[in-house]
Image (tube, rainbow, N blue to C red):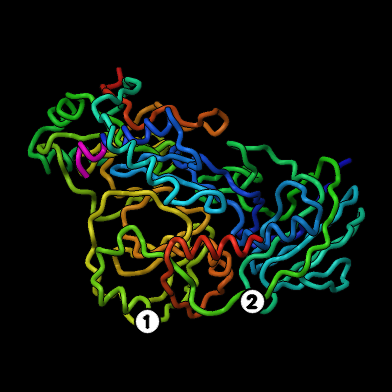
Amino acid sequence: MSAILAINRAGPLTTVQDDGRFGMLSHGVSASGPMDLAAFAWAGAAAGGGRGGIEITMAGVELTLTSGDCHIGWAGGDFAIAINGKRKDWPGSARLKAGYSLAITPGRWGNYGYLRFDRDIAVPEVMGSIATSTRARLGGLSGRALQVGDLIELTGGAGSPQLAPPPPEPATGPIRIIWGLHADLFAPAQRQHFLDAAFVVSRQLDRMGARLDDKAGVFADTTILSLASDAIVPGDIQILGDGTPIVLLRDHQPTGGYPRIGTIITADLDRFAQLRPGTAVAFEPVTVEHAHQLLRSRRT
Amino acid sequence: MSDSANRAAIALASSLHRHPLPGVAEVVPNLVSVLLRYDPLTSSPSAISGELRLRLFGLDSAAVTGTAWTVPVIFDGPDLDEVAALLGVTVRALITAHNAAPLRVLATGFAPGFVYCGLHPSELVVPRRTTVRPPVPAGSVLFAAGQTAITATEMPTGWHILGRTKFANFDPTAMPPTRMLAGDTIRFEVAG
């Protein structure tokens, strides 16, 4: 039994995502996938575990279930959701019937929210995944963001929604990093300055990366280093030729030639992705072993 | 970046593809390094590094051989005259020198299907352009820093454009989606 969603309004970066397109880096395609993995997973469990979901940005979304019915779950950041005009708790889950409409608008914090279903989003798999890559223009609906008028078919057997405890409020404090591939190219004093300074998330952020404002001038005097291009991973903090730090995110290009001073650890990457423009951010180094411990304790 | 470092990276990746290490999910050769991706919930660098050291110890960089490709190029790029002038040769001599020796695919993957080929001899080395050009089409043949690159998707570039080829190295509906691999050899020729 299938159901059809009609998009009535969508922000410019509203995309279909699944867990990601892994194993394609040597073909020039990074994994993509949700900017906030934990929220995506929570919404999926609450909905009933259908494949894929819709990633919503601060611009919000409005849609109608034009036929069929389905169970939905939502989570990620703090947004407001209304079904047929009636406000529901965020995060949460509900059953939608044909003709129901739904509107999501931004709340107090966060850049990304997720809407998931008990059925699979029926779009063609590209290289093993339906995740939209905004950079490579692959996956989702022809590799693009959702637009007004799009119809999304939900297919497959309905899964069972799980009653999960509400996700914890996001941690505060410094974003933890491990020192990066090129950290040794920066002088010890500059590395210390990097840890002491507060950067600010700039308005230039998207699924590929988030530029930081370097108010303290940590990298103001950085001379352009000539490096052989090397592999990039999500969370890498790259220093551009003009000294601008940029944190590379899910739709990063697979390689880059700018020096990387550090890499945000996986356990803190969801939290970083949810920081709105204008938010101050400080970094704190941890060891790889500590980063792994933090990840394991979060997942259990 | 050196020829021997690149050969070693390709040889290590090739060895890890032929005989996978437990716990390693993805192996990606780059210009002078190899990315190993692992799941930190089930593996760790310390679990992988011992085996990896043994592999590095027994590495034979000379043993890597790949597919031999011939890529026809229409040499009509907007930067031909400028590059020839930088090198102090005629455009005809530049094209002849460019195609004279087969190149190796040094790495792939900056963008879908993008390949770096090299290394040209030192007399063919020019720096990148000082400005980045707006998106150039798939199949553009780029030239800078002793390398020739081929684009497989539209992209902005700071490299010089020598020409274009119909060779398409990216098809998202195929598996694998790209045809050229690091370690393959490429002979460029003037399209007839």
Which quadrant of the structure image shows residue A296?
A: bottom right
Q: Are marks 1 and 2 in contact (CB under 8 Å)?
A: no
- What residue span does the magenta drawing correspond to? B1-6
Tell me the residue at 92%/55% (across/down): A97
Question: Does residue B114 appear to the left or right of A169 in the view shown?
Answer: left
Q: Is residue B107 left or right of residue A205?
A: left
Q: Could one spot residue A112 in this view of the protein?
A: yes
Give me the disc on residue A109: 2
- Whichever of labels 1 and 2 marks the residue nearer the N terminus, that label is 2
From this view, report whether residue B73 is shown above or below residue A106.
Answer: above
* Tally of numbered discs: 2
Q: Is residue B5 located in the magenta-colored stretch of the structure?
A: yes
Q: Nearer the viewer, residue A82 or A284?
A: A284
Q: Residue at x 51, y 60 (%)?
A: A292
Mark 1 and mark 2: span between their CA atoms? 25 Å
Left or right, B70 with reference to A169: left
Name the residue beneath numbered marker 1.
A196
Q: Position of residue B180 (x, y in %)?
A: 39, 28
Residue A12 is one of the magenta-drawn residues: no
What quarter of the picture does the C terminus of chain B occupy?
A: top left
- Say left or right for B163 vs B122: right
Seen in the picture, residue B172 relative to A132 is either above or below; the reply is above
Give the image quarter of residue A57: bottom right
**Mark 2 element type:** loop
- Residue type at mark 1? Asp
The numbered mark 1 sits on a residue in which chain? A
Residue at screen point 31% across, 69% down: A243
